[in-house]
Amino acid sequence: MQEFIHKLKQAKRVAVLTGAGISQESGIPTFRGEGGLWKQYRAEELATPEAFRRDPQLVWEWYEWRKKICSEAKPNIAHLKLADWEKKFPEFHLFTQNVDGLHRRAGSQQVTSLHGDIFSARCTKCKYFLSDRDRFWDSLPPHCPSCGSLLRPHIVWFGESYFEGDLDFAFSFLKETDFLFVVGTSGSVGVPVQLAAFAKANGATTVEINPMPSGYQSMMDIQFSEKAGEFFSRIDI
Ligand code: OAD
Ligand code: ZN
């Protein structure tokens, strides 16, 4: 651990990739863990354009349920420490798959929300976009106040492309990163796994924090088999 901290302190560029596990200790259920199912549905059955076409009301109900949990949650020690890390390294960036907004609420500014933002909605037809933490729709599915078409959650669903520019930026940042931390993500989604593999192939020291085995294991140099809150409570840099 001491040798690791020593090396980390000398890093010029540090990247972090987070998943639902980092917000688990804030009370937000992970997708594939206990409490992750809503009614009987798995994320893969709801977070898709097909599911939304078939039953927009059902998909919206799921997001409104998750949004309420996210709006009541508070950042935990792992989010807070990572906000602090931003000031400790010459270059730092956080890539998150989470849509709960907790990294920004903890104070992180160098954040790319790869999968969108649960507090934002956009029109399926026109350019209308709304970002409002306190907005809960009184009738679902909501419609665009500008053109009347369906609104949809501002989320990157399975089968959809990432937001323009995000992956170009991620690959360019990860090409020369000294460290990549992968925190609380199962490895069930392809692109984030590719990002980690790319960082590793380009010489990054890769570190995972996850109490359970994940799809990232084979590309990790160092593994901490513990909860994010435990790890970040004990590490001081
Ligand atoms: P998952 O639910 O697939 O995985 C959560 C991971 O967090 C698991 O590997 C757990 O072992 C780990 N974990 C649980 N508690 C933890 C803790 N306290 N500290 C650290 N790790 C912990 O969530 P993601 O990997 O984030 O996408 O899922 C990826 C994407 O799939 C999500 O962004 C979402 C989902 O469908 C979309 O909705 C588009
Ligand atoms: Zn519209």
Image (cartoon, helix red, strand yellow):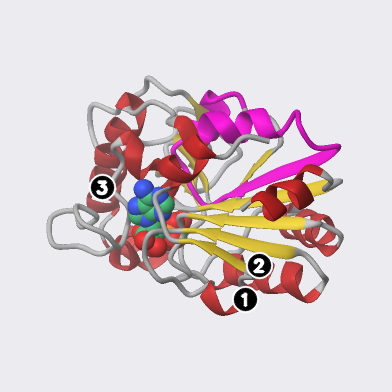
Residue 105 forms part of the magenta stretch: yes
From this view, report whether residue 187 is shown above or below residue 141: below
C-alpha gap between disc 2 and disc 1: 8 Å
From this view, report whether residue 109 is shown above or below residue 164: above
Residue 193 forms part of the magenta stretch: no
| Residue at image point 40% right, 44% down | 150
Q: Amino acid at mark 3?
A: Trp
Q: Amino acid at mark 2?
A: Ala
The disc label shown at residue 87, or none: none
Whether the residue under disc 1 has CB within 8 Å of ligand 1: no
Element under disc 2: helix
Report the number of numbered marks: 3
Q: Position of residue 102 (x, y in %)?
A: 48, 32
- Residue at the disc numbered 3: 62
Q: Is residue 12 left or right of residue 1?
A: right
Q: Amino acid at mark 1?
A: Met
Q: Is residue 43 left or right of residue 217?
A: left
Q: Is residue 129 visible?
A: no
Q: Quadrant of ligand 1?
A: bottom left
Q: Is residue 147 left or right of residue 192?
A: left
C-alpha gap between disc 3 and disc 1: 34 Å
Q: Position of residue 215 (x, y in %)?
A: 48, 75
- Residue at the disc numbered 2: 196
Kindly check if marks 3 and 1 are in contact, taking CB atoms under 8 A apart as contact.
Answer: no
Kindly check if marks 2 and 1 are in contact, taking CB atoms under 8 A apart as contact.
Answer: yes
Q: Position of residue 208 (x, y in %)?
A: 55, 61
Element under disc 3: helix
Q: Is residue 125 visible?
A: yes
Whether the residue under disc 2 has CB within 8 Å of ligand 1: no
- Residue at the disc numbered 1: 219
The span shown in magenta is 79-107
